[in-house]
Image (cartoon, grey):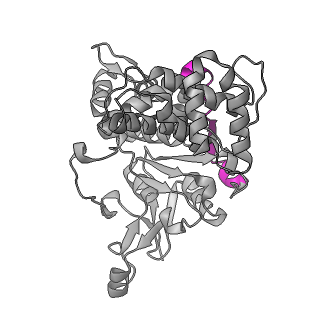
Amino acid sequence: MSVSAVPAAEIPEQTPAQTPAEEVLRPHAETVYAAELAALAAADDRPRPARWQLSPWAVATYLLGGTLPDGTVVTPKYVGPRRIVEVAVTTLATDRALLLLGVPGTAKTWVSEHLAAAVSGDSTLLVQGTAGTPEEAIRYGWNYARLLAEGPSRGALVPSPVMRAMAEGRTARVEELTRIPADVQDSLITILSEKTLPIPELGEEVQAVRGFNLIATANDRDRGVNELSSALRRRFNTVVLPLPASLEEEVDIVSRRVGELGRSLDLPAVPSGSAEIRRVVTVFRELRDGVTADGRTKVKSPSGSLSTAEAISVVTSGLALAAHFGDGVLRPADVASGLLGAVVRDPAADRLVWQEYLESVVRERDDWKDFYRSCREAAQR
């Protein structure tokens, strides 16, 4: 049986139900930042790889922020080393796939989504990796009603997001790659090396068109779950996303994201919340690093990761408490319970770590008295 390529037009379209953008709890990046992407496209006079919506320079500007010649301000989506973004974008312009690696909460998914939005104008071609992810999620599946009625046919074939990205020359995303079983992971090898996805049931194949690439993310604490084979790892260029380098950088990230989430949830702005944000971030960094910010006191670290994403969650929850059950001003009592939940993951070991930190570090800071009392009260409930 001869093998032929399946034209992109013959891949079945998946048309989701349309919901007004203002009603969506979390719109896709290409929707939220449509104005910025349009302004960048209009100002972008640099060469663009095939089927890219923007040039590599404009994609990097979209992620890192900047001001365009017409005065449009592009907000930063990623706060971190510029070189990391440049290497990631350059990788996508080659024939190598991109693997974003890092500890939990280092914005791997966030960066992946925004890269796909800027490159392809579509961040929705996504495979969510779990221990139960089947090979069909990466290759293709079948509409079994049609398969039984008419046998293997193009009409009965259900393309995966990766297959659609190959046919349309777009960017596919695979989240939590190391959580996917090893044999399913390896179904990516032919796709990434040969840029081909065989369909033996039809004697056909889908060949990737120019513009196709793939972004995967992996938690480097999960390396022992389903480690990548050496053959698959060679198909990726790995970029490690670090934790924020400084307190100021992390405070900036948390403040920006809390503001965005607050607006999406119709929470009032908190003009006096910066002090509590700084305290939460300071606590996270000191417990993460095992030493206080001044380097004078060593502290024990809890079992959890205490990531920037968790700090954002703690502050956002506190903001909601202040808005709905307080006077709208973010106070220590609003973040104390969230902090306790983030730090104490193992009730036996982590509670002792938290109590020791409160007594030896927080209690000794003169301007943290209210914060200390609120955290003590939350711990005793």
Position of residue 57 in the picture relative to residue 186 (left or right): left
**Residue 29, image x and y in percent?**
36, 39
Corner quadrant of residue 75 = top left
Q: How far across and down, in percent of the image, does residue 76 sit?
A: 43, 25
Number of numbered discs on residues: 0
- Which residues, given as a range, are shown in magenta? 230-249
Q: Where is residue 320 in the image (x, y as percent from the top left)?
A: 38, 38
Res 290 quadrant in image:
top right
Residue occupying the point 53% across, 29% down: 85
User: Who's the residue at 55% across and 21% down the image?
Assistant: 249
Front one among 305 and 44:
305
Compare residues 314 and 83 and report the one nearer the observer: 314
Was residue 239 drawn as part of the magenta stretch in this picture? yes
**Residue for point 46% across, 56% down:** 162
Q: In the image shown, does 322 or 243 lie closer to the viewer? A: 322
- Does the image show residue 82? no
From this view, report whether residue 369 is shown above or below residue 209. Answer: above
Residue lying at the far bottom in this picture: please name it. Answer: 149
Is residue 359 visible from the viewing direction of this image? Answer: yes
In this picture, residue 173 sits left or right of residue 290 = left
Residue depicted at x 54% and y 25%? 370
Q: In the figure, 160 relative to 112: above or below? A: below
Residue 182: give x, y in percent of width and height. 66, 62
Instruction: State yes or no: residue 373 in magenta.
Output: no
